[in-house]
Amino acid sequence: MGLFIGAVTGPDADGMPAFSEPMAAVGETDVQTAPAPEQPIETILASITPSAGNPDPVLEKKRSLKVRNGDTLMSIMLSAGIAHEDAHDAVSALRAVYDPRDLRVGQRVHLTFAPDDNLKEMQLDPSVVRKVAVRRDEATSFRAFETKRNLTLKISFARGTINSSLYKSAARQNVPLSVLAELVRIYSWDVDFQREIQKGDAFEVAYERFLDDDGHVVRHGQVIYARMILSGAAKPLYRFELRPGKTDYFDDTGRSAKRPLLRTPIDGARLSSRFGKRRHPILGYTKMHRGVDFAAPTGTPIYAAGDGVITFRGRNSGYGKYIRIRHAGGFNSAYAHMSRFRKGVTQGSRVKQGQVIGYVGSTGRSTGPHLHYEILARGRQVNPLTIKMPSGIKLGRKDFARFEVKRANIATLVANLQKKNTITQR
């Protein structure tokens, strides 16, 4: 088996993560690669390449197939007209470097055919840093290959003043959407982004970028530092690894930003109805609304607000498809009007905070697709947007000592990025 593996490079030689020149009002300009045009599944691409041992070019056919729900590598190859024996041998050879069961919906499988229409190569990209392939080695056998791209880790920094919305202000500073989503997520336990953001508030964020050898951004990584200034009060957060594989965000005192329950267990939704008395849109009379509604397209994922056990899953009168979760500390959360439940989420099963439990719909007494969300404290429905949540965990003495070193390193890095930003703007 031919096998080549590269590496992801990280900090510069001085021990600090690498970073490049910042752009005006941001931190540095991200160079984005243009996405490849979408290829129809039926499209066959032809390229002219020299055949082995023959300088004269021969016609080589290529086909790019998009993985759809229910597809396997075998089914994709057979649908492309590849002989069953060749498909079987190619998939068997690929197992040396890649598990075919890891194939994801939306992934692309690239096939190359020889002039006699026999399979010459199959290639796919399991991740942005990894490519795997099988190539015909002899008339009846295939060999597997794996390559990993060398990526350089750099840190970008952005800051801005909010004039109308955090989204618009972040977009003006070229903050990637994935980074903005993470910024919102790590503050979502403590900040109501629908009501608390005011004109004149500000944000700062430092985040990872991974660049290839040509300087193109391949992907964005984690937020390592963030700071929201709301009504004059600064709320900084630092990313810290508690133990291998487990990270969280902590404030200056070493207290976690994470709370037992999410205030908004859904992404990208609009708050369409608040907690309190309202004129019911269907019944037509004033009635107490004992939750909050988030309008979102049908099929939008709904997350478990916290760790717990599902105590109800099924239809519940006007609530439609409904889930209730029991959490520690006397809390319960409820989710109504779902279009469907996620497979495997059943009554009695344990769930983790942020786990998808179902999808937005309009079942039950509903005028359109939305999530009706409730928090119950010791059996009483309370306002999810205003309830005071218990504080997050506090780091112990040893962990806090490590955290202070990490926080100081991040503060130095951010100060350097800010200084470069100031020089650039002169």
Image (cartoon, rainbow, N blue to C red):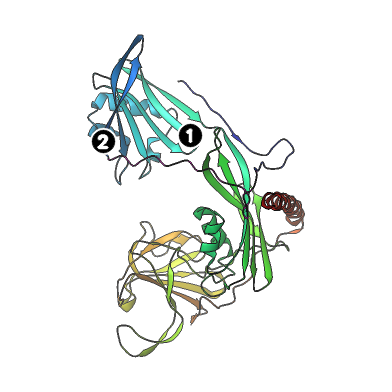
Residue that mark 1 sits on: 130
Which is more N-terminal, label 2 or label 1? Answer: 2
Closer-to-camera residue (191/74) = 191
- SS category of the residue bearing label 2: loop
The stretch drawn in magenta includes residue 24: yes
Left or right position of 211 against 17: left
Residue that mark 2 sits on: 43
Place residue 105 in its image quadrant.
Answer: top left
Residue 336 visible in image: no
The stretch drawn in magenta includes residue 6: no
What residue lies at 62% left-to-right and 69% top-to-bottom? 201
Whether tag 1 and tag 2 are in contact, CB under 8 A, the answer is no
Q: x and y percent of residue 28 in the render? A: 61, 47
Tell me if mark 2 has few (under 14), some (14-19) or many (20+) residues whose alpha carbon lies within 10 angstroms of its own.
few
The amino acid on which the numbered mark 1 sits, given as a three-letter code, is: Arg
Q: Which residues are magenta?
A: 21-40
The residue furthest top is: 53
Q: x and y percent of residue 50 in the render? A: 35, 15
The quarter of the rendered structure image containing the N terminus is: top left
